[in-house]
Image (cartoon, rainbow, N blue to C red):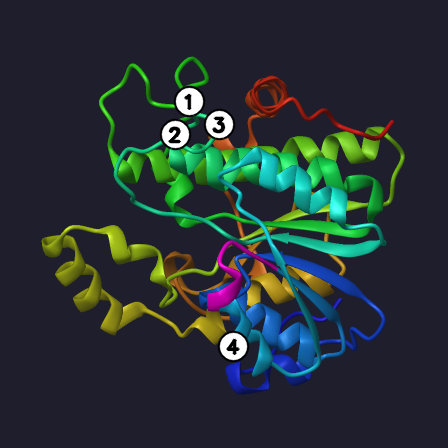
Amino acid sequence: MTSSLGTAPEAADALPPQTGRTVIITGANSGVGLETTRALAAAGAHVVMAVRDLPRARPIAERLPGSTELRRLDLADLASVREFADSFGGPVDVLINNAGVANVPLGRTADGFETHFGTNHLGHFALTNLLLPRITDRVVTIASNAHRNAALDLSDPNWEHRRYRPSAAYGQSKLANLLFTLELQRRLATAGTGLLALAAHPGAATTGLNRHLGPAMKVVAATVGRLVMQSETDGARPTLFAVTRDLPGAGYVGPGGRGGQRGRPTLVPRSATAQDATLAAELWNLSERLTGVPFPLG
């Protein structure tokens, strides 16, 4: 197994050839998702860019190297998720669950779920299970260091009875991403497949996820960002590592530097809660009930 992707300017060149592989990336038209798309397409993959706003994404896609394809997907609407999955008939080598929202005011998806939980977790949960019979290699889900101080309240995942805090809701959704990966890998192994479920996080990368912070927190984020933030290209390196390297199932990839903020991609630890197999199974069962999408294998 190759241990790193080299320096940032060499990241795309260091990728193993991806010719003949098909990769779906949610949220592929901006931030880390765009840089992941760019690198994989340049390495020869056919990248399906699953995006909510096609007119906005189209001029971006036209400037990318290699083979790309735009398809509409709104993770905050399960009807859109089903439509996307139903329209995709061929095999998929890799699904990258990258799209997400962060620190948004209290809101609801089209199906009535809290926005973070419904978009970041339930939308990707449904998408993965609907596509799983066509996936040939792995599912990579993008998590965050925000999971470390998060709690998951399965009695109130949609914040109907608790005082809503955007940062706590975001952290809960990122913890859910890791628990989803853990239980997905267990189910894939039990079903006797050779598929992998992996997770990755970009560290402190300059993305658009902090645009919903309040004025004071934006100043703090900008000040700290000048000291610790890495570029979107560097932020994509853990995802690319997880997509292309030989890794153990349920592995978690992130920057290897201090605090997991920046540095060369490597396997990194997760919180004790994110390793709770019982909680992961309970979340899975709840997610199946909420979305109506079961595990399709085995």
Question: What residue would you read off at disc 1?
Answer: 157
Proximity of marks 1 and 2: CB atoms separated by less than 8 Å = yes
Identify residue type, mark 3. Asp
Q: Residue at x 43, y 33 (%)?
A: 109
Q: Residue furthest left?
A: 216
Mark 1 or mark 3, which is nearer the start of the sequence? 3
Q: Which residue is mark 2?
A: 114
Which residue carries the number 3 mark? Answer: 111
Q: Position of residue 248 (x, y in %)?
A: 73, 49
Quarter the N terminus occupies? bottom right
Q: Nearer the viewer, mark 3 or mark 2?
A: 3
Q: Quadrant of residue 180?
A: top right
Q: Which numbered disc, 4 or 2, marks the residue closer to the eye?
A: 4
Label 4: few (<14), some (14–19) or many (≥20) C-alpha neighbours in 10 Å:
few
Identify the magenta region: 50-56
- Is residue 55 magenta-colored? yes
